[in-house]
Image (cartoon, rainbow, N blue to C red):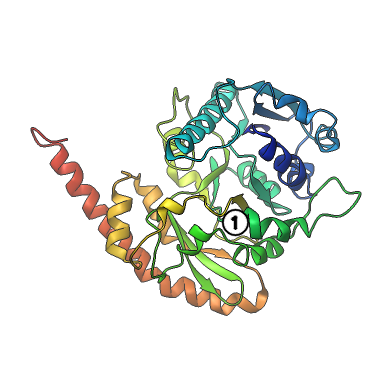
């Protein structure tokens, strides 16, 4: 099997983050070193011409070349380093989608090639990529993982504490990484806790705390870590965590959602004010969430993902609480899925009528 990574990375801040945290975590023993070599793995980094020199002389790039061919692709110069307005945030998402589409097209028509559409702000627990690769080897067409978001301000120091002087790789055990998530969670992500009085207005993922640091998540959207597509696509209609996999893979039964972080554990980070416009004003409600989800016209297999409790395990002592949270959240998940199906059906029915939208 051959692996092709397409990673958007531009702006001095994100280049520094990628070189100091994300790429080192990819080099943990259970990640790239467990399955990759230059003859079967290619990493294409998409950056701006003015950012390209920031990668020169980075020891971590040289270390990564032991496991993959590293290539750089240039982005148009009009893309700014930082994005502050809603319009600029949309531009950033569009640019990441264009990069991922370039990765998809680069692998189309190549037999036994797997594409990985990841971002420069991800942190991978040791063993995450290796486990996902083994799932692909065992016959999965795609491996998806739900990825929480931590705060750069409060979360980054927790991650950096695992760095070891003189070591290129950043090796963090899955349960140690989960243990960082709730203490260092992004403010908007804290409002995704079911029962929060100001529940998020973007409930594509939400969670129930379990024990001191563990939790159980339900997710409509999960990120494609590895995809072995069945056919070519000419464009993405949304970001890759929404509908790409369900368009690229014909047999949705071969799309595997990771249901425990003991297998695959990842997290990304953003500034504290990221997604603050998604902060809600009312509490969580299954019917409201179902209405929101119905607007995505999700495929049945994607909607069913919500029925899978995803266990984020920080400590063995939390297992009973995790099991309880999974059981307690199941009726809510079932209600959301059932109502989303109903709302989606009527929305489609009315749009099909003469004069409908």
User: Which corner quadrant of the image does residue 200 belong to?
Assistant: bottom left
User: Which corner quadrant of the image does residue 338 belong to?
Assistant: bottom left
Q: Position of residue 140 (x, y in %)?
A: 56, 43
Q: Position of residue 189 (x, y in %)?
A: 50, 59
Return the residue found at the far front.
84
* Residue at (71, 64) in percent of width and height: 176
> The C terminus appears in which quarter of the rendering?
top left
Residue underneath mark 1: 150
Left or right, 11 with reference to 34: left
Q: Can the viewer see residue 62? A: yes
Q: Position of residue 335 (x, y in %)?
A: 30, 65
Vertical side of 324 occupied by 353: above or below: above
Provide the secondary structure element on which disc 1 rests: strand
Vertical side of 158 occupied by 317: above or below: below
Vertical side of 77 occupied by 142: above or below: below
* Residue at (51, 34) in percent of width and height: 92
Q: Can the viewer see residue 263? A: no
Return the residue found at the far right.
166
Q: Position of residue 343 (x, y in %)?
A: 22, 52
Left or right, 167 with reference to 299: right
> Which residue is more in the foreground, 321 or 254?
321
> The N terminus appears in which quarter of the rendering?
top right
Q: Residues within 10 Å of mark 1 (few under 14, many from 20)?
A: many
User: Which corner quadrant of the image does residue 61 belong to?
Assistant: top right
């Amino acid at each position: 099997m051959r692996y092709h990574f397409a990673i958007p990375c531009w702006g001095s801040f994100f280049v520094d983050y990628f070189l100091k945290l994300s790429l080192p975590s990819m080099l943990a023993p259970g990640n790239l070193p467990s399955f990759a070599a230059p003859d079967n793995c290619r990493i294409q980094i998409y950056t701006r011409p003015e950012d390209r020199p920031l990668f020169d002389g980075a020891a971590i790039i040289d270390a990564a070349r032991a496991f993959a061919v590293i290539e750089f692709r240039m982005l148009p110069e009009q893309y700014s380093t930082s994005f502050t307005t809603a319009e600029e945030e949309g531009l950033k998402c569009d640019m990441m989608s264009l990069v991922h589409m370039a990765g998809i097209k680069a692998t189309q028509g190549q037999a036994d090639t797997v594409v990985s559409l990841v971002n420069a702000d991800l942190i991978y627990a040791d063993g995450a990529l290796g486990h996902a690769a083994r799932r692909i080897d065992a016959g999965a067409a795609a491996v998806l993982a739900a990825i929480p978001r931590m705060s750069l301000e409060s979360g980054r120091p927790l991650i950096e504490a695992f760095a070891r002087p003189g070591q290129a790789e950043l090796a963090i055990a899955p349960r140690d990484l989960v243990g960082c998530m709730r203490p260092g969670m992004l403010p908007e992500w804290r409002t995704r806790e079911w029962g929060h009085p100001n529940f998020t207005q973007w409930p594509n993922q939400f969670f129930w705390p379990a024990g001191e640091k563990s939790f159980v998540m339900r997710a409509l959207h999960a990120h494609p870590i590895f995809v072995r597509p069945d056919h070519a696509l000419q464009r993405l209609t949304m970001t890759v965590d929404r509908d790409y996999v369900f368009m690229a893979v014909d047999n949705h039964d071969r799309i595997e959602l990771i249901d425990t972080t003991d297998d695959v554990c990842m997290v990304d980070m953003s500034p504290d004010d990221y997604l603050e416009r998604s902060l809600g004003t009312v509490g969580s409600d299954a019917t409201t969430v179902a209405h929101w989800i119905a607007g995505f016209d999700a495929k049945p297999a994607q909607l069913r993902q919500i029925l899978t409790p995803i266990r984020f395990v920080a400590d063995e002592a939390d297992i009973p609480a995790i099991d309880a949270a999974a059981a307690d959240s199941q009726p809510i998940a079932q209600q959301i899925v059932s109502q989303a199906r109903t709302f989606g059906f009527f929305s489609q029915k009315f749009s099909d009528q003469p004069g409908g939208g």
